[in-house]
Image (spheres, coloured by chain):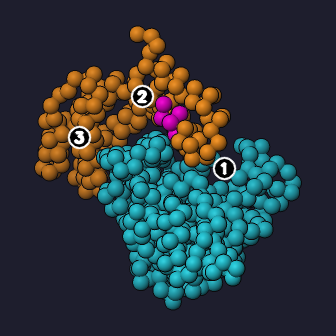
Chain colours: A cyan, B orange
Amino acid sequence: MDRVRLERYLSGRLGDEVRITSLSQAFPGLSRETWLVRLDRGRAGAAIEQGLVVRADSTGGPFPPVPLEYEYQVYVHLAKTEIPVARPLWFDASPEPSDGRALFVRELVEGSTLLPGLGDDTDAAALRRKRVGIEHMENLARLHRLDWRTAGFGSFMEVPDSAEDAPRRELMRWWRVWERVRTAPLPVVTEALHWFADNLPKRAASVSLCKGQNGIGEEIWRDDRIVAFCDWELANIGDPCQDLALSQGMLKLWDRDKLVAHYEAVAGFPLPSDNIDYYIVWNAFKSMLSLNNGLNSFLDGRYRHLARATLGYGKVKVYEHLLGAITGLDLHRAANLVMRGQPNPYHNKKVAGG
Amino acid sequence: MRPTTVELLDSIAQALEEQVLPVVQDKWGASTLRSAMQLLRHLALRVPLEAGILAADNDDVRRILTLVGDRLSQLGETELAAAAAAALSAHSVDPLDVIAADAVNETYQGAVEMIIAARDRLRTIDTPPQIHQTLVDYLQRRLDRERRMFVPVFLSPPF
């Protein structure tokens, strides 16, 4: 993003003189661009420092087929609750500095999405992993207890009729999306979708506002505490078990059963282990869907970024093979197969016992 | 002819990894290099294997769609039988023409996908069950044929 154009744009929107002192893009930003902006606002000599985050659609469009404005609306509604998020400022459907690609601006929350040293093979790091895992569970539980109706999420999110309806609604919603965005017929995936229907949870643990993707890399941490949740593009109203299932290794930081028990104590409702197993496998499908959607702009020439091919083609083939393997398995064995295939980015094999 | 296609692709990937990547400071550039290396390693597997795999898969799926199409006709599933027949009516292609063979294969996969999608309805009429398991068995053979082109090369970091 061009600094001069962005400076001019922010000055106009903020109604103030703006001088950008630092502009950097979060790596890798393959789906959507996240620009960290530090600026001086106001007349020289009386300027105040401010940090902003500009989140914009990439040239090739996002991986998850979800409009950016949807994510912005999640921030708008959450900012009125006790759930920690950065304060959203505005959404622009066709802004100049990104050549018309939609963007939204939010305040910058100081902290880091990464926790260096978390995976070290030391006693201190092991204690830290337990602490971080518990912190994550507590924050998820608070999110899942949020009164999303009062907070207005039903005004723009699909709402299940009941806890019994929630799992099927999630399945059918994304089955339709898959048929719309997939780049080629993949009958293995169709067979896998039948498997999901056959193994559907009878009811959701509760009907909660779910984050959709979480774990380290998705939230902002400071002193090993979550100071802000970010990345809400897959947020939905549904079974909270999905958020524990797709927590990108958080359940491996400490004893999984103890982490889940801690979550249940804070949330006030139990999480059926079958539901968690189901969503562990389900997330393999949703990840595949998002990556394959990202391949569309590579194939039509709009965005020949090589990672779109390695992910949208290569990784999707790996997922296709994984889904082909799970269709012959029961739920528990399928979940174990998916978990075995997931790299644990937070601690090494020696610590993980693998 | 030497060097072979595989030797060229492997050597390009190796040169990028050993001689270029270590001196690229920019993380975006380094990321693109890693993607390029992974794709080159995949191509080194795909180029010598693809024609044979496609030929075998096309022969297999044509046989399966013929069997399944006949069964669908017997059961009165005219729309699905027509989908199978339409796919089978695609002109035969030179198996060495990988692009044409791949296009025909995609047509076959579309028909297979349509029949798999109708699983629940077909279960009630296809007794003893033949159609679904025949297709599932074919899909497992397809995955087994092609696996080495994708696994484990695409298990490494993609960017």
Q: Residue furthest front?
A: A44
| Residue A35 relative to residue A345: left or right | left
Closer to the camera, A282 or B40? B40
Q: In the rendered structure, the residue with mark 1 lies on which chain?
A: A
Q: Quadrant of residue A316?
A: top left
Residue A54, x across and y down, in percent? 54, 68
Say if the magenta span includes residue B84: no
Spatial CA distance of label 1 from label 3 is 39 Å
Write the start and end of the magenta stretch as one range. Answer: B35-40
Mark whose residue sits in front, 2 or 3: 2
User: Is residue A207 in sight in this rendering?
Assistant: no
- A15 left or right of A93? right
| Position of residue A104 measured from the top left corner of the image (x, y, whole percent) | 49, 72
Q: Is residue B127 above or below residue A53?
A: above
What amino acid type is highlighted by mark number 3? Thr
Residue designated by label 1: A344
Q: Looking at the picture, how far across and down is residue B135, in whole percent?
A: 31, 41
Residue A87 visible in this rendered orientation of the protein: yes
Q: Which residue is mark 2?
A: B46
Q: Residue at x 34, y 46 (%)?
A: A301
Q: Amino acid at mark 2?
A: Arg
Q: Amino acid at mark 1?
A: Asn
B37 is within the stretch colored magenta? yes
Q: Horizontal placement of B3 versus A50: left or right?
A: left
**Residue drawn where x is 63% and y is 71% of the image:** A39
The answer to whether B85 is drawn above or below residue A194 in the figure is: above
Secondary-structure class at tag 3: helix
Q: Can you tell which mark lies on residue B107?
A: 3
